[in-house]
Structures are given as C-alpha cells and as structure tokens.
Amino acid sequence: MRIALGSDHAGFRYKELLKAHLLRLRHEVHDYGTHSTEPVDYPIFIRPVAEAVARGDWERGIVLGGSGNGEAIVANRVPRIRCSLCWNVESARLARAHNDANVLALGERLLTEDEALAILDAWLTTEFEGGRHAQRIMLIDSASDAAQRS
C-alpha cells in the first residue's frame, strides 16, 4: 500500500516508529514531515498529507500529534478525506469497516508505542464492509463536494 505520513513536533517520535513499521511491512511511504521535535504549526504538515490522499497520489494517510485532535480536524477539512482519530484497536477497526477511513489520526501523548502499532495494524488490515455503509460514505462525500463548490 502507498501511505503518506505527517506529524507535528509532538507526534514526531511515533511518526518515525510507524514509518519504520510500515517499511518493514513493505509499504511504500512518503514522509511529509515534520523532521524533528522542534515546535511547528501542524497544519503545514498535515494538510499536504490529506490533499495528497484526496488527489489519489497516496492510498491512505497517517497524521500524528500530541492528541491527534487538531490533525484530524485539519485533514477532515479536505474534501473526500475521512480521517478518524483512533484510540484503540476497535476504534481503528470500525473506522475502516464502517467509515472507509482513508486517513488515521493518532495522539502520541495518549497512546503507548504498542497501542499505536496495534491500532495501525488493525487500520491497515481491516477492509471496508460496504453495504449500508457505502451509502453513508456517498452522503459524506457529496456534502463535502457541495461545501467546496459554495
């Protein structure tokens, strides 16, 4: 899978951890930064991840910060992005199965390394169920498209 990554300074350490894990699993990864723990404004690094996924340059994206909240908000401002802030394996599984989440947000300050890796693995391996959920995704995306046109 082709995956874009981005973080702020508070998510940098886990971004590096997840990047190494993804590469071990033979995924193709593009790192949009940041590249250190020096304080930065997270939208500068998160929006390019979401835009690249929305354009189809990358199949999925992962964004990280201290809590992941701001990162999820920024990503979800981009049409056709369905970013889910996940805090355990079940939230990641449902984000994919029911919401076809194409971007994952994680908070480094709220998760252990093992939890972050387990969430990532669940999010990577869970397929979208489709069915009744496909109609909901269509409604989400059409509302996003309408908002962009106005």
Image (spheres, rainbow, N blue to C red):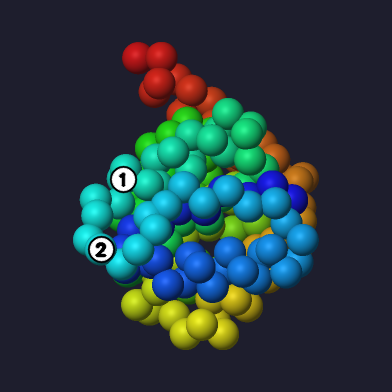
Q: Which residue is mark 1?
A: 43
Residue 134 position, x and y percent, is: 69, 40
Residues packed near mark 1 inside 10 Å, few (<14), some (14 to 19) or many (20 plus): some
Residue 50 position, x and y percent, is: 48, 41
Q: Residue at x 39, y 23 (%)?
A: 147
Question: In the picture, residue 13 is in which quadrant?
Answer: bottom left
CB of mark 1 within 8 Å of CB of mark 2?
no
Secondary structure of residue under mark 2: loop
Q: Indicate whether 118 appears above or below 93.
A: below
Residue 26 position, x and y percent, is: 77, 61
Label 1, label 2: how far apart the Cα atoms are: 15 Å
Res. 89 visible in picture: no
Q: Which mark, by number, is residue 123?
A: none
Q: Quadrant of the C terminus?
A: top left
Which amino acid type is marked by label 1?
Answer: Pro
Residue 106 position, x and y percent, is: 45, 66
Horizontal side of residue 26 vs 7, given as left or right = right
Q: Which residue is mark 2?
A: 38
Q: Nearer the viewer, residue 38 or 55?
A: 38
Which amino acid type is marked by label 2?
Answer: Glu
Q: Indicate whether 67 appears above or below 6.
A: below
